[in-house]
Image (tube, helix red, strand yellow):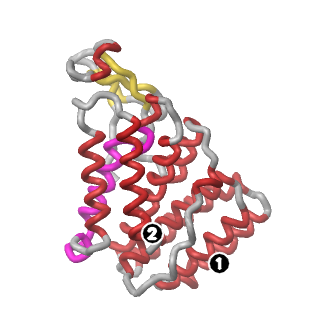
């Protein structure tokens, strides 16, 4: 992931790097809707490059009145022979794990982990990951949620490492992107349901996050990049980055938020639920 520095502009000559979860200020174009608020407009930082999807969802919960159990999605179909699709869907299931952790739902956690085992098996990792996934389900059953959070983050990283060890680097990238895309889909849904204007940028975290994901896509092999699976995801990320990075549009509107969620939902449904 490429580091992202959020800058607090004190003047045209002075800038300092901000810590995580504080306010930054950026100059606003004269024709911006926000110009009437003054020369500067405050924007909260919702994403930093060191965040995991688990961190992102947890932070979203702090800024919204999240009803996590209403955000569950249907069970994905059985994996097909398309390993790229299986990897992306597996990533989305990992993103679902972070959602279920927020909900504290042990039965749903177990069900989701069973799906993860199925997709791991299709990618040749079933026997390697199953013991850890079963142990995670047991922790959820015992309400060991505090310890489980770090365990599922570490399990995500182990899965990526195992894929790379078996020379499936592209699949590792797709798993990671799938987890982030599912997380963005969840958070954008949360933001659609709240009226706060200052929370609207939360639905994409930061244009830098979208750019980071596109950069990850650029590391894929040419055949993978050109696949019918990957192209729609790249298209959505590119469009969203362009819209949310446009300094001349003023503060994000409710329509922007709704459209963002629709785009994320549609691409995730198409690639992971059909």
Residue 99 shown left or right of residue 162 in the figure? right
> Is 7 drawn above or below residue 178 in the view shown?
above
* Residue displayed at 28% across by 17% down: 35
Quote the CA–CA distance across marks 1 and 2. 16 Å
Whether residue 19 is situated above or below residue 270 in the rendered picture: above
Left or right, residue 134 beside residue 95: right
Q: At x 20% / y 18%, what residue is drawn?
A: 30
Residue named by callout 2? 160
Q: Residue furthest right?
A: 142
Q: Quadrant of residue 222?
A: bottom left
Proximity of marks 1 and 2: CB atoms separated by less than 8 Å:
no
The residue that disc 1 covers is: 131
Element at label 2: helix
Residue situated in front as seen by the camera: 162 or 89: 89
Q: Range of the magenta residues?
A: 201-225
How many residues crowd mark 2 within 10 Å: few (<14), some (14–19), many (20+)? many
Q: Nearer the viewer, residue 191 or 98?
A: 191
Residue 102: horizontal and vertical position, in percent?
64, 51
Relative height, residue 160 to residue 197 (above, below): below
Majority SS type along the magenta span? helix
Instruction: Locate residue 170, reporting x and y percent.
Output: 33, 72
The quarter holding residue 99 reads bottom right
Which residue shows up at 44% across the image and 75% down it? 274
Q: Earlier in the sequence, mark 1 or mark 2?
A: 1
- Label 1 residue SS: helix
In the image, is residue 272 part of the stretch drawn in magenta?
A: no
Q: Position of residue 219 (x, y in %)?
A: 26, 65
């Amino acid at each position: 992931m490429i580091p992202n520095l959020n800058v607090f502009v004190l003047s045209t000559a002075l800038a300092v790097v901000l810590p995580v979860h504080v306010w930054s200020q950026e100059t606003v174009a004269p024709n911006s809707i926000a110009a009437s608020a003054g020369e500067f407009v405050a924007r909260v930082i919702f994403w930093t490059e060191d965040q995991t999807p688990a961190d992102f969802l947890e932070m979203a919960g702090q800024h919204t009145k999240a009803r996590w159990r209403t955000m569950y999605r249907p069970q994905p179909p059985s994996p097909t022979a398309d390993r790229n699709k299986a990897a992306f869907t597996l990533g989305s299931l990992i993103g679902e794990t972070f959602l279920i952790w927020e909900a504290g739902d042990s039965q749903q956690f177990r069900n989701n982990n069973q799906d993860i085992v199925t997709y791991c098996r299709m990618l040749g990792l079933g026997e390697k990951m199953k013991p850890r996934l079963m142990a995670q389900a047991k922790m959820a059953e015992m309400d060991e949620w505090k310890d489980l959070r770090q365990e599922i983050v570490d399990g995500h990283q182990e899965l990526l490492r195992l894929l790379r060890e078996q020379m499936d680097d592209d699949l590792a990238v797709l798993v990671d992107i799938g987890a982030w895309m599912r997380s963005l889909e969840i958070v954008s849904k949360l933001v659609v349901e709240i009226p706060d204007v200052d929370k609207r940028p939360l639905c994409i975290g930061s244009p830098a996050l979208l750019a980071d994901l596109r950069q990850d896509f650029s590391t894929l092999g040419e055949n993978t990049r050109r696949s019918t699976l990957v192209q729609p995801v790249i298209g959505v990320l590119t469009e969203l980055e362009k819209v949310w990075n446009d300094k001349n549009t003023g503060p994000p509107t409710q329509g922007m938020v709704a459209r963002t969620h629709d785009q994320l939902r549609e691409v995730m449904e198409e690639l992971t639920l059909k």
